[in-house]
Image (tube, helix red, strand yellow):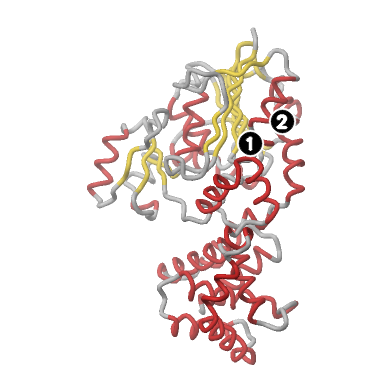
Amino acid sequence: MNVRASAAKVLNQVVEQGQSLSQALPTAQKDLNPKDKALLQVLCYGVLRTLPRLDFFCRSLMSKALKGKQRDLHFLILVGIYQLLYTRIPSHAAVGETVNGAKALKKPALKGMINGVLRSFLREQDQLVAKADKEDTLRYCHPSWLVKRLQQAYGNEKAAEIMLENNQQAPMWIRVNSLHHDRETYQSLLEEVDLNSVVSNDIDNQNALRLEKPTDVYRLPGFEDGWVSVQDGAAQLAAHYLDAQENDLVLDACSAPGGKTVHTLELQPKLKQMVAVDFDEKRLLRVQDNLDRLKLSATVIHGDASKPDEWWSGEQFDRILCDAPCSATGVIRRHPDIRWLRRDSDIQVLVDLQKNILNALWKKLKPGGTLLYATCSILPDENDLQIAHFLENTPDARLAPLANDKAAKGRQLLPNEDAMDGFYYAKLQKSV
C-alpha cells in the first residue's frame, strides 16, 4: 500500500466530501503497520494545517486544475509538496513515493505530470513561499472568514498568535482518576515506564498531567482498569467548575463522548444520579464505553438538549453541565479539518441553537441550582456575548465565580494557554 496515495484519498474525503478527519483517517489506518499508520496521520494532519499554502503552490505550478475523477491526484501533489516543505523526508524519497502514488490511485499515465510539478516546486520554492507570506489567509492557513472574526475579536497581533498556535501539534493530556490514585502517585507510575509528564499550572486542574511526548494509551499504567483517561487540560476544568456535591441530581447535556460525565463521577461518586444526554446516538456508545471502562454508572439518554421535555419528566436538576454544540474553533490544533469544514454562516446557526438549549435547560434547573455553560470555541458570539444576552433576558440568573476565582465572570481560554485547548466557561446560579 502506498501511504501517500492513502493520504490523498483521505484528504479528498475530508475536503471535497465533507467527512471529518476523525471518521476518514481511522478507516484508512486500519490495516497499516504502526510506522505507516503514523506517517499517514502526519501527512493528513500536516496537509490540512497548511492547505491554502499548498493549494497556492499547486495552482502556481499548473496551468490547469485537476478536477473530477482526477481530483485525488491534486491531493497527492499537495502531499508531495508538504513533504518537501515541512518534513525531514529526503526530497528524492518524497518525490519518488508520491509519484508512485499515481499508480496506486490507478492513474499511472499521470506519473510524469506529478514528477514535473514536484520538481518545479523544488526549483521555485523560495519565490513561491515569499509570495504566500504576503497574504494573511496563506500565511496563517485559516479561511478568510475566520481570520476576520479572530482579528475583530482579539486584534491583529493576538489573532496572529492564535492562528500560529492552531497550526501546531496539540500535546497529549491525561486525567488521573482520583478514585484510584492521586496525581503525584500516578506521575511516579508513569516514570516507571519511561513516560515523563508535567503537572498543570492551573490551580483548578487537580487531576491533569501533560505528557512530554504522546504515547499509545495502552502504555499508560492501568488504562484498561480505569486509572487514567485521555482528556485535554481545558476540558478537565469542567468537572471542577461544576463542583457536584453528594446526593446531587446532575445532568450532562450534549455529553458525548463522555469525558466530563465520568470525570464528574470520579470527583463525586455519591451523586443521587448522573444523567448523560446527547443527540448523536452513535456517539452515545462512546459515553457507555467510557463508563464501562471506568466501572461507573449513569443514566444514558438519546435526546435533544433543546427539547428536554421529550426525554425528562423527573425532578429538576441540582447541577447541569451545558457543554453546548459550537464552532470548535478552540480545538483546531487537534482537528485541523474544522477550519475547512466550517462556514461563516454556521456561527449564527450555532449561536441560535446554544440560546435555545440554554433557555430549555434553565427550566430544568432547581432554584438555587448551578448551570455550567461550556464551549470549545474562542469566538465571542458563542461565549461572552451569548452569556451576556442570556443574563439580560433571564431575571432569575446571575453569574457566579468559577472555583478559585473571586470575581463572577466567564473564562476564555485561548489555544496553548498552559498548553491547553481553547475553551470557554461561565457558571450561572439560579435564584431561590
Residue 179 placement (x, y as % from top left): 37, 30
Apparent side of residue 212 relative to residue 10 in the rendered image (left or right): left
Residue 67 vs 42, above or below: the answer is: below
Other-residue count near label 1 (Cα within 10 Å), few / some / many at <14 / 14–19 / ≥20: many
Other-residue count near label 2 (Cα within 10 Å), few / some / many at <14 / 14–19 / ≥20: many
Q: Which residue is mark 2?
A: 357
Tell which circle, 2 or 1, labels the residue nearer the N-terminal end.
Answer: 1
Label 2 to label 1, Cα distance in Å? 10 Å
Front position in the image: 399 or 304: 399
Hey, which quadrant is residue 281 in on the image? top right
- Name the amino acid type tagged 1: Cys
Mark 2 and mark 1 residues within 8 Å of each other at the beta carbon: yes
The residue sitting at 51% across, 23% down in the picture is: 402
Residue 431 placement (x, y as % from top left): 65, 10
Residue 138 placement (x, y as % from top left): 61, 63
Which residue is the extreme one toward the left? 192
Residue 193 vs 271, above or below: the answer is: below
Q: Nearer the viewer, mark 2 or mark 1?
A: 2
Front position in the image: 397 or 158: 158
Q: Which residue is mark 1?
A: 254
- Name the amino acid type tagged 2: Ile
Front position in the image: 379 or 44: 379
